[in-house]
Image (spheres, rainbow, N blue to C red):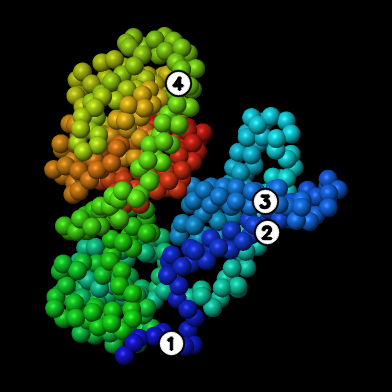
Amino acid sequence: MIFSPSPDRRLQLRLSERRWLLIAGDVLAVLIAVLIALFTWSVVGRYRFDLEFIWPRSFWFVVLVGLWLLLASANDFYDVRVLSNRAVTFQRLVVITLQLLVLYLIVFFLAGPLRLPRLFILYYGVASFVLIALFRLLNPALARWASARRRVLIVGTDEATAVIVSTIARYAGHVYDVRGIIGEIREGQTAIGDVPIRGTGKMLLRLARQEDVTELIVTSTHELDGETFQGVMDAYEAGLTIVPMPLLYERLTGQVPVEYVMKNWSVVLPIEGGSIFNLYALFKRVLDVLLALVGFAVFLLLLPLLALLIKLDSPGSVFYSQERVGLNGRIFRIYKFRSMRADAEAQTGAVFSQEGDPRVTRVGRVMRKTRLDELPQLINVLRGDMSIVGPRPERPEHVRRLVEKIPFYRTRHVIRPGLTGWAQVRYNYGSTDEDALVKLQYDLYYIRHQSLALDLNIIVRTIGKIIKMSGV
């Protein structure tokens, strides 16, 4: 018998389906806003608003939708943590609109006179802000038929269960309604977190029907006893969605939980693997070279001033070189502007830099906050040692220790390291082995989901961090 939710209950959309519903609504709002802006332009300029006026300017529909999606993604506008807080949602909407206006102003002045319309983007900014804000305000009413929280059961009573229970409560309590836990009941244990243990595997399907559950979150397929495994299979045959805990954790946090994937390499390696028909690697390399050449021009302009300041601030060389571990574990030398005393590691050897590190010079502190000390690494990008985006390369001394301590740490080396990465834009500066574990979880997420869209997302976030001077 195929299981189906109660007919009097609203549709329980998946997390990805809710996100796509919001994206579709926002894109529609952007398209309407472009049309409103074009209409306003025609009225102010006293043009006839018809297809002859719209067609030569139709590229704005594509450009502004693309910019909206890029900036919205870079500002986590579709992140579950943002979606659950209306105040934060509107704050991000203001930020995205301002970022778009500033970006347009920069391009406008660089493009020269009469190349771009003056007030069109202002008309668009106002219209898109109002329309998207209204859509988010009215969304619960417009989508009431699909606004019910998704009812789920968690299968398993191991440590990973406690992690996913707390993760759902923290990030997606407005999306998931956890009705209980199925698994082995240990002595004195009746709940994990605030979620009760409801029974064993033989009760799974009956409980799922009783609670109108549409999804099972399985914490570990390796440790399921025969009875629980059979219950999961019965539920799957009845039409319930089965989601492994690591995949749900990844969707909610942007991290791969390496401590809980056991020996399941498929969860940490790239989703599709390599292919001769996948042009991403070629496009990524072209983007690397283009951005590195632009950045190198900036590097040459700033070099005399930075070199003088570094020399005046403290004795020692202008540049600093270190060995780092790159693609496939190959050792290469990385180049930086010197930001610490020349004898910074004379007493300690190779150690992580700390926040407020006393070894950092006055000029070095400013360079590190603005990431200017990393500019010489553009040479490494042009040489092919590094990419613009990827896991930050680590020193061999740290890698040898972390490979022994952290599962799957070597997986970071299956792609080129980067000037910036997913871990750098999503996590604060790390100075301990525990921080290295968290950063690895973000790096593995990037490795599994590599795309030009994600690369552009990270680049935009990095620019934001540079402007905020949030380096250490």
Place of residue 24 in the rendered image (x, y in percent of width and height, measured from the top left): 55, 63
At horizontal 23% and vertical 33% (from top left) the residue drawn is 325
| Circle 1: residue type | Ser
Question: Are dots 2 and 3 in contact, CB under 8 Å?
Answer: no
SS category of the residue bearing label 4? helix
On residue 6, the disc is 1
Label 3: which secondary element: loop
Tell me the residue that label 4 is attached to. Answer: 299
Considering only vertical position in the picture, is 391 above or below 139?
above
For disc 3, the neighbor class at 10 Å (few under 14, some 14 to 19, many from 20) is: some
Q: Is residue 129 visible?
A: no
Label 3: which residue? 58
Which residue position holds label 2? 32
Q: Can you give x and y, in whole percent of width and height, for residue 136 in the image?
A: 60, 63
Q: Relative to the observer, which residue lies in front, 157 or 3?
A: 3
Question: Between marks 1 and 2, how big is the CA–CA gap?
Answer: 37 Å
